[in-house]
Amino acid sequence: MKDTGSEVKTLVAFTPRSISGEVAMSGSVIDRKGYESAVFTCVSGNYTSTPTAINVECKVQQCATPAGSFADVTDLTDALLPVIHTHISGEVTTTREATAEINMDLRPCERYVKLVVAADFTGGSSPNLFFGATVTLGEPRIMPAI
């Protein structure tokens, strides 16, 4: 039997938690060995303190080692990474949940990647936003047996 689940690997990229606009926060270090693409799915939830606008920037960083110094993934040769970061933004509405995806080619990246999230709020008194993300690794170098 052939199924999608045997061709992808989904992991927690950013453990769901409350974020504020004070500092960028890093997610889990992802070992992408054996996979050539990824989709980071970013999800925002409830917020506190009635801000009038919210902007969340999500970007991917890379490193050769899991505990090394991570650097932003930037556009590489041949435009292999057309989208390297995304925003969840806009005026606050009664619909508080929003999603965004970062779909990327991992071939030119180093072995370890992670998501970095920064929130910016307009209005409110010390607002916070509940946020989390997953990453689905795909295009395995060695396909599973059918």
Image (cartoon, rainbow, N blue to C red):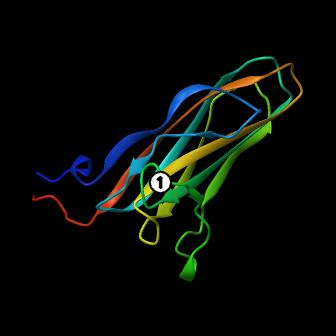
- Direction front: furthest residue: 68
Question: Secondary structure under badge 1?
Answer: strand
On the image, which quarter does residue 98 sit in? top right
At 20% across and 65% down in the image, what residue appears? 142
Q: Determine if residue 126 is in view.
A: yes
Residue 130 position in % (x across, y down)? 63, 25
* For residue 8, side relative to residue 14 (left or right): left
On the image, which quarter does residue 35 sit in? bottom left
- Direction right: furthest residue: 123
Residue 16 position in % (x across, y down)? 53, 28
On the image, which quarter does residue 23 sit in? top right
Q: Looking at this view, is 110 or 38 the one in front?
A: 110
Residue 19 position in % (x across, y down)? 67, 28
Residue 92 position in % (x across, y down)? 79, 29
At 63% across and 29% down in the image, what residue appears? 97
Q: Say which residue label 1 marks.
A: 113
Q: Looking at this view, is 82 or 146 the one in front?
A: 82
Query: Could you tell me the amino acid type at mark 1?
Result: Val
* For residue 1, side relative to residue 75 (left or right): left
In the image, residue 134 sits, relative to residue 95, either above or below, namely below
Question: Label 1: few (<14), some or many (≥20) within 10 Å?
Answer: many
* For residue 101, side relative to residue 53 (left or right): left
In the image, residue 140 sits, relative to residue 11, either above or below, namely below
Question: What quarter of the picture does the C terminus occupy?
Answer: bottom left
Q: Looking at this view, is 110 or 35 the one in front?
A: 110
In the image, residue 64 sits, relative to residue 29, either above or below, namely below
Q: Determine if residue 94 is in view.
A: no
